[in-house]
Amino acid sequence: MINFLSQFMKEHFDNLTLRPPLFYSWEYGIRFEISMPWVQHEDKNNLQQIEERINGIFNKVFHDTDEMLLVTDIHCEKNDTFLQKRPTKVYQKYIKDKELRRKLQHRVLPSVFWEDEDGEDYEEMVTHRFALSCEKSDIRYKPLLTAISYEDFPHPSQILKGLYRPGIDIYFVNVTKKMIYHLYDDRGCDVIASNKEDLHSLYEELNDWILDYDREQIDKIFK
C-alpha cells in the first residue's frame, strides 16, 4: 500500500510530498475552520461545532463505496524506539476488522520535512509511515476524528499521550475520487483534490465553514 500511495501521489498529485500544510502545497484545495477562534476547547458550543464540521466534511468527501487509504505518519528521531510502533494503536482501536488490520504496512522514510529550509534540523529525524487500504465502513471514523481534534489537549483519546516532541499526521486518502482529507488539529482541516471540479460541491455547500484568512485565495480557484 505504501508503494501504491507513492504511485498514486505521482500520478494524480504531480508527485506531491504528503505532508502538511496540504492546502499551501497544492493548487486545488480548501481550508476549513473547525473550532471557534478564541474560545476554550472544552466549551460546549465549540465541541459541538468541531463534531459537526469534522464529520460533515468527511461525509461529503467519502461515500460508502469509495476505495480509501488510511495513512498515519509519525515524525520522531531515528533512535526513538518507543514511538516507532505507536501509530499501530490507531489501527487497533479504529479499524473494526482484525483480519483487515493484518494488511497494515509500515515503512521508515527520511523525514518528510527534510526539504524545508533548515534541512539540518531533520537529519536525525525520520517519518514512520503506516498505510492501510480500506473503505469508510471499516473505520470508526467519528471517534478517530475526535481523537485527532484532541491531540493537543489532555484527553483519554490522545494518540501520542502528550508526547509533544514528535508529531503525528493522519490522512484519509480517497483513491476513487482522488481527494485527500487532513484534519491537522482542532483548528482546521485541509481537503485537496487532483481535479478542482471534485471540490466544487464542498465549496458551494460548506462555504460558511471556509477559513476567512484563506478565503480570497480559495475564491479565486472557483470563480
Image (spheres, grey):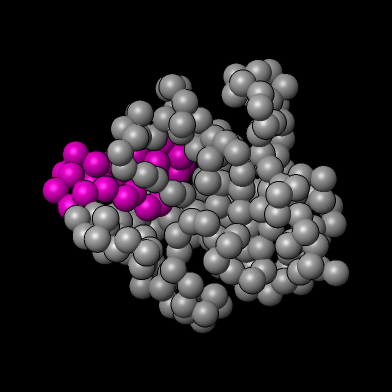
Q: Can residue 97 be seen in this view?
A: no
Residue occupying image coordinates x 77% and y 59%: 216
- Residues 210 and 109: in front is 210
Q: Give how far across and how far down residue 74 sits, in percent.
A: 34, 49
- Residues 29 and 58: in front is 29
Residue occupying image coordinates x 80% and y 62%: 219
Q: Where on the picture, by quarter, is residue 5? A: bottom left
What stretch of residues is rendered in magenta? 72-99
Q: Is residue 82 magenta?
A: yes
Outermost residue toward the front in this view: 118
220 vs 108, left or right, is: right
Q: Give how far across and how far down residue 130 sits, in percent.
A: 35, 55
- The image quadrant where one finds the C terminus is bottom right
- The image quadrant where one finds the N terminus is bottom left
143 vs 117, left or right, is: right
Residue occupying image coordinates x 45% and y 22%: 155
Q: Does the magenta stretch include residue 206?
A: no
| Image mark count | 0
Give the vertical position of 92 relative to 137 (above or below): above
Q: Give how far across and how far down residue 53 sits, in percent.
A: 70, 39
Residue occupying image coordinates x 27% and y 57%: 122
Q: Can residue 3 be seen in this view?
A: yes
Q: Give how far across and how far down residue 41 sits, in percent.
A: 59, 24
218 vs 88, left or right, is: right
Give the vertical position of 99 relative to 39 (above or below): below
